[in-house]
Image (cartoon, rainbow, N blue to C red):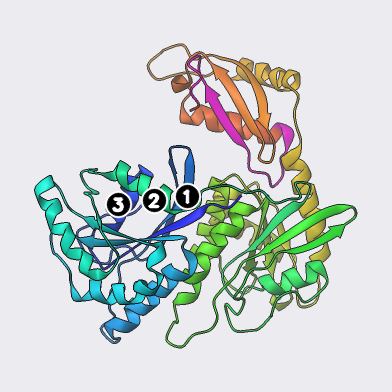
Amino acid sequence: MKKRIVAVVGRPNVGKSTLFNRLCRKRSAIVDSVEGITRDRKYEEVEWNGKEFILVDTGGIIPNPTDSISQAVKLQAELAIAESDLILFLVDNQVGVTDIDNSVAKILLPHHNKVLLIANKADNSEEEISAYDFMKLGFGEPSAISASHGRHIGDLLDRIIDNIDTSDYEDQTEDEIKVAIVGKPNVGKSSVLNRLVGENTTIVDSVPGTTRDAIDSKMIYYGKKFRFIDTAGLRRKKSISYGVELFSAMRTIESINRSDIVVLIIAADEPVSDQDQKIASYAARNYKSIIVVVNKWDLIEKDNSTVGDFVKRIKEELIFIDYAPIMFISALTNLRVRKTLETITRIHEQSTKRISTSELNNFLQKILKQRPPTHSTGKHAKIYYCTQQNTNPPVFIFFCNNATLINKNYRRYLYNRLRKEYAFEGASIKTVFRSKAEKDL
C-alpha cells in the first residue's frame, strides 16, 4: 500500500517544524526560534478524515557562506520536487515576500501543479489580508494559517487531501512475500539483490548512490513467490556531497511501506550509523518484520569472538529491534547470501502464524497468576481475555475493565512474555488494550 508524500519546504524560521507538529498532532520536530535547527528530514504519518499521507519536515533553505543562494535553493527544491507528491511552500505572513522566497518560487514554478502556497503566522483575520501579497510568487491564492495557534489547520488538511490521490492500492498478487532492501548508500544493497535473484537487475558501482530508479524484482524460491523492492539512491551530482542520504530517504520510506519484511543492509567495515537507526526505527514503528544483514563480511579479520562482538554491538545500537535476526554475508563472494532467502521465508511464517484464542487465554491466565496488573492509584486493573485479531503483523487485543489502568511497564511485560512464549522471530508484533468502551489504547 502506497501512501502519498507531502513535503514542507521554505526558507528558515517560517514555522515549518511548528506546522509539522501541528499536522501530526505531536511534538516530533524540534521547534526553536534559532534559524536552521532542523537539519534532518523527519517523517510522520498523518490521518485526516480516514485518509493517510506521509508528512516530511525539511530543514530550512540556508545558504552556505561558501556557496551561493541559488545552489542551496536549487538543491532543496530538487529534492522536494523529485520525491514528493505534494509540496507545501511555507512563507512568513508577518515578514512578507523575501529574496529567498522568490528564489524558491523560481525553482518550484515549473511544478506549480503540485505546490500549495501556505502563508503562516496569520494569527488573526486582519493579518490574513497580507497573505494576498504572496500571490506574486505565482502559485495562486495562499492558504492563510497560524500553525502555532491552530488557525485554519482543518481547512489546510482538507485542501491537502483534495490535492493528492489518497486512494490505496494493493499489489495484485497477495501471495507474494514483499521484501524491501534498505540501507544507507554504498553498503551493497544492489549487489545483495543481484545475488538473491540471480541476475543483474540493477546497476552496481562503487560510487555511493548510483541506483537511480527502484524496480521490483520477482522470483520463486522453493514454491514461494518473492517481490524484492530495491531502494533508489541518487545519481552522482557535483557539489552535492550530502544530498545522497536526503534524496534516497523518501524512497526508503515508500519501500518500507510497501513491504512485508525489511532487510536492513549494513556494512561490516562501518559502524551502525544514525541513518541505520532511523530506517530501523521507522520500520519498527510501522510494524514491519525486520532482518539485519551485515554485508562485506569478507573484509573483516575474524577470530572466535568476532561474530559475538558484532552481534552485541548491533543489538546495543539497534536495541528497539532486538528481536531481529542478524546475518553475516558477502555479496562479493556469495557467502551465505542464499541463506537470506531461507531466513526471509522463516520470518514470514512467523509473522503470518495465528495463535488460537484458547491457547492465548491459557497463556494469559498463567501470566496473570504469576504477576497480575497493578496501578499506582490502587484502582483495580483487570484483563479478561486476549485474542489475535490479525497477522502480518500479528495483532493481539487484550480486553480489560479499563485499559487506562494497564501501565506502560505491564504492557511491555506482556509484550515480552508473548515473544518468549511464541517466538515471532523477526516479526514485529502489536498489542492493543481495549476497555469496555471499545477504545484502543
Picture quadrant where residue 62 is located: bottom left
Q: Is residue 429 magenta?
A: yes
Magenta segment's dominant SS is loop
Rounded to the nearest angstrom, the CA distance separating label 3 from label 1 is: 15 Å
Marks 2 and 1 close (CB-CB < 8 Å): yes
Q: Give the mark, 2 or 3, whose residue is nearer the N terminus.
A: 3
- Residue 92, given in percent of the width and then of the height, sits at 19, 61
The mark found on residue 160 in the picture is 2
- Residue 318, given in percent of the width and then of the height, sits at 56, 54
Q: Is residue 26 left or right of residue 281?
A: left
Q: Is residue 123 left or right of residue 139?
A: left
Three-letter residue code for mark 2: Ile
Judged from the image, the secondary structure of the residue bearing numbered disc 3 is helix
Task: Confirm whether residue 313 shows in the render.
Answer: yes
Range drawn in magenta: 421-439
Rendered residue at 66%/50% (across/down): 324
Per the image, the residue denoted by label 1 is 53
Per the image, the residue denoted by label 3 is 19
Closer to us: 71 or 36: 71
Task: Confirm whether residue 93 shows in the render.
Answer: no
Rendered residue at 28%/87% (across/down): 66
Disc 3 crowd rating (10 Å Cα; few below 14, some 14-19, many 20+) is many
